[in-house]
Amino acid sequence: MGEYQKNLQLLASSAPRLLVAGVNEGLDALLLGDMARARFEKGDGLAQPILHMARDDKRLEALSQALRFFAPDVKRIVLPAWDCVPYDRVSPNTETAGQRIMALARMVAAPKWKAPVVVLTTMNAAQQKVPSKKFIRSSLLKLMPERVIPMKKIAAHLQQSGYLRVGTVMDHGDYAMRGDIIDLFPPGRAKPVRLNYFGDELETIRVFDTETQISRDHLQKLLLMPVNECAFGEEARSTFRQRYTALFGAVTSTDPLYEAISNGVRFEGMEHWLPLFHIEPLQTIFDYLPNAHLSFDHLYEEARTNRLEQIEDHYDSRVHSLEQKSFGGAPYKPLPADQLYLGKTEWDDQIARHCARLLTPFELPKSKEGVPVVSFGSRQGKSFATERASATGNVYEAVVSHIRALHKAKKRVVLASWSAGARERLHHLLENHGLKRSQLVSNWREADNMGVGVTGFAVLGLEQGFATPELAIISEQDILGDRLIRKVKKRRKDADILTEVNDISLGDAVVHADHGIGRFEGLRTIEAGGAPHDCLELHYHGGDKLFLPPLF
């Protein structure tokens, strides 16, 4: 067994605390995947998840993408933090809310999976309390085609889960009903979904486009989840009213939050009173994954301290009504911080119950403050800044020369580019400057199986490369310098100019280039040419009807 495997087995062991040195960014994703596999092998065929806490959202995204390359066989669950500050007046973005609900739903089942699992989150997300596992389980509804489940039951479930009934579905959390069709936009999905009924039988589940309203791919199953982490329905409203008045006393008509919730209306920022909506006490991510091994990014302690200070500062500001005095905003009654967030003592207690590994790119003594140190011996890769700045040298020749030296030292070499196009260009340039025996690789397994002396080219977004005793990854940025990121403006086809169906409501007047003014009566599925088509139904004076595909 090599040194790497010995260290890996130690990380997967029941040692309570370990400092993991010599782990540069990039190697951490490779290591997390290997740790998850090693833990899975010790778990009698069931997952023993790795819960990794990134220091911020940027690191979370980078780790998620890198893990996709290094461990495509490992299940990834990503739990982001709310994209708003503590005690804000705005709600989390609907996409973020959907990602969190999906992650919580997957974590409920994660320990039973017969596959390795890595849960990625941030320090901010881990310090925030979440709805109980019981609430998440009871809020899930699995739909499959050709099953009998009445439309009324679906509609009731959607209302109870916080969906908003609209004329035309546009955003996450919307749903619409017309005839034998239910359109809905579940959290966590990129496209909305259309349920087609025949009586009480759910015939098909199809994805559709919000602009064209055209149904496309069929789905074999759909898991309905709540819109966000708040509970909805009459019981939740009653619970909120009781707890709100118990905390803050009698409520006046100047309290828009209380008025909105009492009337069954969503209120912007209501999530910041999350525990008041739930009968069950809120839980933590540690309750979802009681058997997980924990791992932490370098500088995680600073990130945690900054978050605690931010929570305290924003709470104090609300308590002293600073915003009301300065800006004339409505009264804001903040919940005590311990109802929404883990304090320092609670956090330390939770960490003490799990095996924890702290990753750092630096080398450390064999033991630090009584905690054993395991080193993987990586270091930052070579930068070609000097060669780029030289008026006489050629950076690509320098890269090829460096690759040859690495192969001579018996190292596996991979060049990492940010996109497939960038990979093709870099591959072509280095081949033109003398690179021999190269291979395009789509994941780490392919790179690991390359022959001796073969250079791999991968799509892997690393800002800096790294090197270990057995491996060297050279990033595109090491060679070419910092990327220039240009936002590409999406071009619009001429045929799409009149596709804004989501801006049209029932009864609106619509002007057709050939047929003139008609009244929009919604969408209708008709059969033409032996196939069903979703069409706009327009009514004209005298009872004439016109059916048009949304691209008209």
Image (spheres, grey):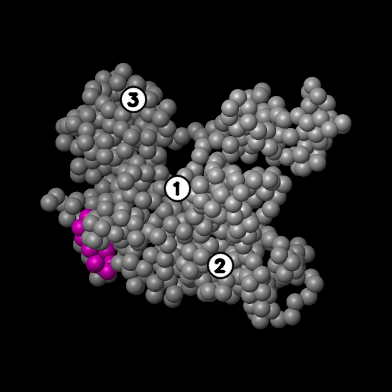
Element under disc 3 = helix
Q: Look at 31% across and 55% down and name the residue there.
A: 114
Q: Position of residue 77 (x, y in %)?
A: 41, 53
Q: Which residue is mark 2?
A: 311
Q: Return the disc, 2 or 1, that comes first in the chain's sequence.
A: 1
Q: Are there few (<14), some (14-19), or many (20+) residues within 10 Å of tag 1? A: some
The quarter in which the C terminus is drawn is top right
Q: Is residue 547 left or right of residue 113?
A: right
Q: Position of residue 116 (x, y in %)?
A: 31, 54
Q: Which residues are magenta?
A: 8-21
Three-letter amino acid code at disc 1? Glu
The numbered dot on residue 61 is 1
Q: Return the disc, 1 or 3, that comes first in the chain's sequence.
A: 1
- Residue placed furthest toward the left: 1
Residues at marks 1 and 3 touching, judged by CB atoms closer than 8 Å = no
- Kindly indicate the quadrant of the structure image that contains residue 46: bottom left
Q: Position of residue 191 (x, y in %)?
A: 56, 42
- Kindly indicate the quadrant of the structure image that contains residue 126: bottom left
The numbered dot on residue 427 is 3
Three-letter amino acid code at disc 3? His
- Kindly indicate the quadrant of the structure image that contains residue 436: top left
